[in-house]
Each structure stands twice: as C-alpha cells, then as structure tokens.
C-alpha cells in the first residue's frame, strides 16, 4: 500500500522593532514627545482628530541621501508583508516497503520598507513533524553541527527534512559546492536540515526590498530506506513561517 504525503504550511507575520524612548519609568514609556503650545486629541460623532501647534519644520522630507519624517505626529510606520503559502503535496507516493523519496516545495516572498531589513523563520508544530496517527518519519538529523550537503537516510530508517534556497538565505544554508555553512554558493537541493518546534532562521536581509520583495524557496523531502517498513497512511506536517522586521 502506498502512502500519501501532505505538508500544510501555516503563515504568521510578526513585527518587532527597536525604538528609542524619550522618557521612561517603571510604569510607562514615552517613545516621542513634543514641546508646543497647543493641540491634542479630539473627536465627535463625525470625526477623530489629533493635532499639535507650535512645532517647527515638521512633516516628511527627503533627498538622494535620506528620508525623514519630522515631528512626533509623523512617526514612521514600517511596511512588512509575506506572501500566502499554499499547501505542499510531496510526491511521488512511497511504498510501505522497499523505500523511496518524495519531494515538494513552495515559495515565500517577504516585502518590507524597513531600512534595516527582515528575518524569516520556520518551525514545526510537532516533533516529529511528519506524522500519520502513531506512525511518523523522524526529523532529519545532520551528521554534524551544520546541515548535510546531501540528504542521506539509512537503509532501515525514514526521515523528513527541508532546505531553503534564495538570495537572502543565511550563511548556515550556503555552501562551497560540497560543505554547508562554508562559501557563498546556494547549490540546488543541498544543505538539508530537520524541522523542530523552535524557530530556525533561514533568510535575512539588512536593507529594505520594497516593492519587489525577496523570495525564499522552501524544499521538503521525505525518504524511506530500502529495507525500512513504514506504516501506510496519509502523513501530514504543519509548519509556521514567520517574518520579522529588524
């Protein structure tokens, strides 16, 4: 009997930023303040308004070298977006005995105007990640501290792993043609790792990429060894991909 693999990807977006504060205590933090002679918050049944009077040279301005929003009413808002990720079906189906390999992939695009860029993380919601009832594929374990350049599974075992590919992939998943976390090459279908329930940093960019964004391809692989007997069923893994502004 064959097994069918379905990998469900759940996408979450979070924002984290570091801001200076003008005044703080154990009870409060004021990010930005203003010395002026009037203004404030006002509302009615028809409008909500917030104003200041007396600030000098406020508003947005820019040149070829800078962009500035002056005045506390002009506080900068960071744009951060992540593409919707569709479910991934690993194929072909793997025989319950005799082994085999199934592959699948999806692409995640992160777009931000944050001048210091973003980070992209992935994690699984369970350990092991790929399960079908009481049956499972073990999370892939590299031979050493770094991802394995080649996906290698013992004859009597089954494992499930992933690798990211793209222009913003972190050093850990780059290679020199034979070893991962060494060199600057992003060799296709190389540098494999296992998922865990903790966030794993897979891509980062230290500048904005608006409006085109940066795509990272996530490739997944399940493999059963030639002498392994794997319980038949529909195997599912659920992962969370999180983008964070830095």
Image: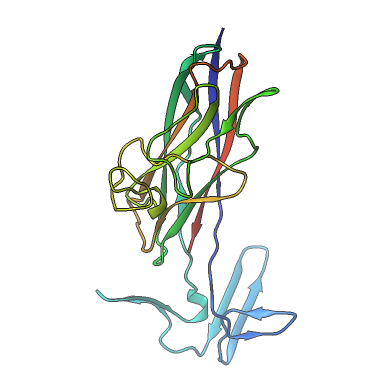
Which residue is located at x 47 percent, y 23 percent? Answer: 90
For residue 34, side relative to residue 169 (left or right)? right
Q: Looking at the image, which residue sits at the far right?
A: 27
User: In the image shown, does 139 or 117 lie closer to the viewer?
Assistant: 139
Q: Looking at the image, which residue sits at the far top?
A: 1
Count the labels in the image.
Answer: 0
In the image, residue 95 above or below residue 171: above
For residue 200, side relative to residue 206 (left or right)? right
Residue 127 place in picture, x, y as percent: 64, 37
Q: How is the image coloured?
A: rainbow
Residue 203 place in picture, x, y as percent: 42, 52
In the image, residue 37 above or below residue 9: below
Which residue is located at x 50 percent, y 12 percent? Answer: 98
In which quadrant is the N terminus drawn?
Answer: top right
In the image, residue 47 above or below residue 152: below
Which residue is located at x 45 percent, y 21 percent? Answer: 101
Tell me which corner region of the image, top left, top right, bottom left or bottom right, holds residue 57: bottom left
Which residue is located at x 56 percent, y 31 percent? Answer: 8
For residue 181, side relative to residue 29 (left or right)? left
Q: Looking at the image, which residue sits at the far left?
A: 64
Residue 49 place in picture, x, y as percent: 59, 71
User: In the image shown, does 73 or 130 lie closer to the viewer?
Assistant: 130
Residue 102 place in picture, x, y as percent: 45, 22
């Amino acid at each position: 009997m064959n097994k069918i693999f379905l990998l469900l990807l759940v996408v979450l977006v979070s924002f984290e930023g570091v801001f200076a504060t003008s005044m703080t205590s154990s009870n409060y933090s004021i990010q930005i303040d203003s010395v002026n002679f009037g203004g404030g918050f006002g509302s009615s049944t028809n409008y909500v308004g917030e104003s200041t009077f007396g600030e000098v040279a406020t508003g947005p301005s820019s040149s070829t070298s800078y962009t500035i929003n002056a005045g506390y009413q002009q506080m900068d808002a960071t744009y951060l977006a992540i593409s919707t990720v569709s479910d991934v079906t690993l194929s072909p189906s793997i025989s319950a005995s005799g082994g085999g390999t199934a592959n699948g992939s999806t692409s995640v695009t992160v777009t931000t105007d944050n001048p210091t860029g973003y980070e992209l993380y992935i994690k699984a919601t369970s350990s092991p990640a790929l399960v079908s009832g009481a049956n499972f594929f073990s999370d892939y374990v590299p031979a050493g501290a770094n991802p394995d350049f080649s996906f290698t599974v013992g004859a009597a075992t089954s494992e499930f792993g992933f690798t990211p590919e793209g222009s913003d992939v972190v050093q850990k998943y780059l290679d020199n043609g034979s070893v991962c976390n060494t060199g600057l090459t992003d060799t296709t279908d190389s540098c494999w790792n296992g998922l865990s329930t903790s966030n794993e940093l897979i891509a980062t960019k230290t500048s904005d990429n608006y409006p085109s964004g940066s795509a990272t391809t996530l490739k997944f692989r399940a493999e059963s060894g030639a002498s392994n007997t794997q319980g038949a069923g529909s195997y599912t893994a659920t992962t969370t991909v999180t983008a964070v502004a830095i």
